[in-house]
Amino acid sequence: MHGNQPLGIAVIGTGRMGADHVRRIDRVISGARVAAVADTDAERAKAVAAGIDGCTAHTDPAAAMAAAGVDAVLIASPGPAHETALLAAFELDLPVLCEKPLTPDAASALRVVEAEQALGHRRIQVGFMRRYDAEYVRLKSLLETGQLGRPLMLHNRHRNVASSPFFTSSMLITDSVSHEVDVTRWLLGHEITAVTVLAPASSAGAPDGLRDPQFVVLETDGGALSDVEIFVNCGFGYQVQAEVVCERGTARVGDGHHLVTSTAGRWGGTITQDWTERFAQAYDDELRAWVATTRRGEVGGPSAWDGYAAAAVCEAGVRALEEGGRVAVEQVEKPALYR
């Protein structure tokens, strides 16, 4: 990339998430273009590339990254494919925005962290997009002023209309609560040291065998508690809410009352139905920020360490769900590169 040239991005994975990012780069944000796409489904990759000038289609992620005009990589393939793609990006020393999870488990995430350390500089930003949501950004800023005092508790609610047919009980932790894990670490500036998972009798709206809802308690090294109600078959809408309780006050986000109507003897509003609607602006802002920092030759946002920490906490969470009781998080010491 030279001067005012747009940042050429290779998008790896053109499913729902990848295709949405292609649309975002092509039509919503400025300063970047889709230079290449890769998908194991060759026809799908070709169909996505067809509408974009100069965009090449590939089935091999490494080939897409090595394509002409590629300056950076956006990984939106399924989690198990991330490690190989990330290591291929390292080979070319390309900056990466990697959708969460960094990788599906702590051991592979640690391998990525170690490979990035070997490079000697950060290359990865992980797609924990809530850090770019306007309400969460305001909450973080408020906490940083210290005017509410020390955070004592963080209450999180995360509700989905319905879960995908392939969703398992442990995926409530690894795919959903992973967001609250990152939010807890980011808002409070603490590491999470232990996880307890409690589950009431499953909702009649949950598929047979799915433990839904769940109540997750996260303990931190800063002496705070963070709890998460995760309910992925609530049936009525998509809600993400957080309330932090501090020594001198509380602050809450996610009530979502953008429009309240009063008519025919009733008042009310609407509830968003999925994450693409609730966090559309956050995804736009996340990508804008990544493109801007990448064009400056910098790396910001959630790091590979944040991806590893989330994986380690989720691993403890899955054990707590399956075995019961409180499970300590096993995590290596934070390397100097991420301090």
Image: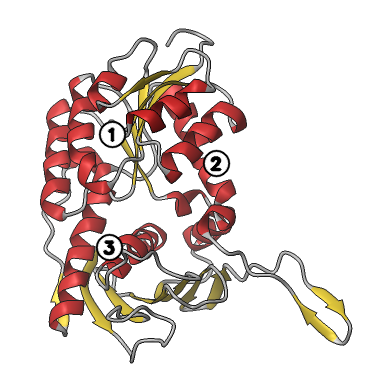
Tell me the residue that label 3 is attached to. Answer: 174
List x then y, in percent, for residue 304: 25, 43
**Marks 1/3: CA distance?**
24 Å
The image quadrant where one finds the C terminus is top left
Three-letter residue code for mark 1? Thr
- Work out whether 254 lies above or below 29: below
Mark 3 burial class by Cα count in 10 Å: few <14, some 14-19, many 20+:
many
* Closer to viewer: mark 2 or mark 1: 1
In what element is the residue under mark 3? helix
What secondary structure is found at the residue carrying circle 1? loop
Indicate which disc residue 285 carries.
2
Q: Residue at x 32, y 61 (%)?
A: 175
Q: Amino acid at mark 2?
A: Asp
Q: Work out how far the residue at label 2 is from the one at label 3, CA to CA, in angstroms.
A: 24 Å
Of residues 211 and 118, the one nearer the viewer is: 211
Q: Tell which residue pokes out farthest to the front in this image.
A: 43
Q: CA distance from mark 2 to mark 1?
A: 28 Å
Viewer-nearest of labels 1 and 3?
Answer: 1
Q: Position of residue 286 (x, y in %)?
A: 49, 41
Instruction: Name the residue rendered at 51%, 45% in the picture.
Output: 283
Foreground: disc 2 or disc 3: 3
Labels 1 and 3 touching (C-beta < 8 A) = no
In the image, residue 18 lies at what x, y percent?
42, 38
Q: Which residue is mark 1?
A: 40
Residue 339 shows in this picture: no
Image location of residue 248, percent across then percent down: 52, 78
